[in-house]
Image (tube, rainbow, N blue to C red):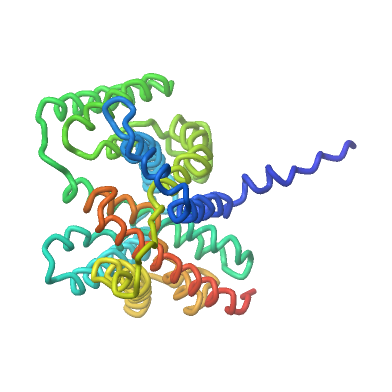
Amino acid sequence: MTASRPRSALRTFMASEAAGGFVLIGAAVLALIVANSPLADSYFGVLKSYLGPLSVLHWINDALMALFFLLVGLEIKREVLDGQLSTWERRALPGAAAVAGMLVPALIYVAINSGDPTALRGWAIPAATDIAFALGVLALLGSRVPASLKIFLTAVAVLDDLGAIVIIALFYTSDLQLGPLIGAAGGLAFLYGLNRAGVRSLIPYLLVGAGVWVAVLLSGVHATLAGVAVALTIPLRPTPGRPEATDSPLHTLEHGLAPWVAFAVVPIFGFANAGVSFSGLGIEEALAPVPLGIALGLFLGKQLGIFGAVWAMVKFGAAQLPADASWRQVYGVAILCGIGFTMSLFIGGLAFGEGTTRGDEVKIGVLAGSLLSALAGYVLLSASPRRR
């Protein structure tokens, strides 16, 4: 029998759960280096330059990130209909954790920035979790963390993303234009009709979906939400007992899109949005209310909200602790949920705009809170004994 060929190191890396997180970290570090180097003027100049009707930064944040939100929408639909969130019993614990994990960070931010009405626009920035970063840290820990906690973290992050999407739609939408909005609704209705008619080819969904994106962009609703809306119309045939089946259009699109989002879309977003110049930055600027509120919201608010919700649910018999997990490990995962990089930067851009002083403060707060959460969560989980 011929021995199978060993996988190359590159293929092993690309298939790794941590790979997407590593690439994103690299993109963020590179952005910080470039923004504090002689290339800084070119870096910021290119991002502000225009290609057609939008700047390069807007093309990245409004168009390219629509693919990220499309993938998020696909993941939410799959998990709710055919995955880890398919029953109310499975939704209870991560649902309570996600809600508390968004509420407590927001309250901390509001408490610190209560005297500044403009700064209060950023209340939702520390409410989000970056699943790529968090799962990347868990992957580094290997078997020291039980699989049930990875599933729990994924479920919390998926529901967290859903909450962030609702927040963006409700609180970060500009003046609505009725005509384009009606056009977007008509496109989505047409896609729903294709789904009901049993059309399984992805081509019409993607073509009409591109038109929906244009209409949403013109409507005043943030264009990336078109990705989520289109994702919800992609057909998924539930496969009881086979949640990882890949024979539906939704699974096909999700598996085809995931590598591009992980290794291209999100790193490009990170590189374009993480760059902040530290020139002239002192302790006073770093501890200003906006960055302080974001950093403490991510680092303290996330862990207090998520761990507190899990403790209450288990204490009162509403849910059970994830299998084979200790309280110490649950607390470590709660800390990791304070890594809020991608979605936090995205909401920060919506709240204060790009290239502003407040925008730089957002980056400082997100980077500080995410780094603290990653290091503290890793140290706590790495010191946890392996459970058999």
**Drawn side of residue 370 relative to residue 51, left or right:** right
Query: Which residue, as the protein is rendered here, is positioned at the far front?
Result: 38
Image quadrant in which you'd find residue 222: top left
Question: Would you place residue 17 above or below residue 250 in this image?
Answer: below
**Drawn side of residue 151 relative to residue 49, left or right:** right
Residue 35 in the image: state x and y as whole percent. 43, 52
Q: Residue at x 21, y 27 (%)?
A: 184
Residue 132 in the image: state x and y as whole percent. 48, 53
Question: Would you place residue 28 above or below residue 192 in this image?
Answer: below
Residue 355 in the image: state x and y as whole percent. 29, 49
Could one spot residue 318 in this view of the protein? no
Question: Would you place residue 27 above or below residue 338 in this image?
Answer: above
Could one spot residue 220 in this view of the protein? yes
Quadrant the N terminus occupies: top right
Q: Nearer the viewer, residue 270 or 31?
A: 31
Q: Residue at x 57, y 55 (%)?
A: 18
Image quadrant in which you'd find residue 77: top left
Query: Which residue, as the protein is rendered here, is positioned at the far right?
Result: 1
Q: Nearer the viewer, residue 281 or 299?
A: 281
Q: Residue at x 36, y 24 (%)?
A: 205
**Drawn side of residue 327 relative to residue 171, left or right:** right
Residue 90 in the image: state x and y as whole percent. 39, 59
**Drawn side of residue 358 relative to residue 146, left or right:** left
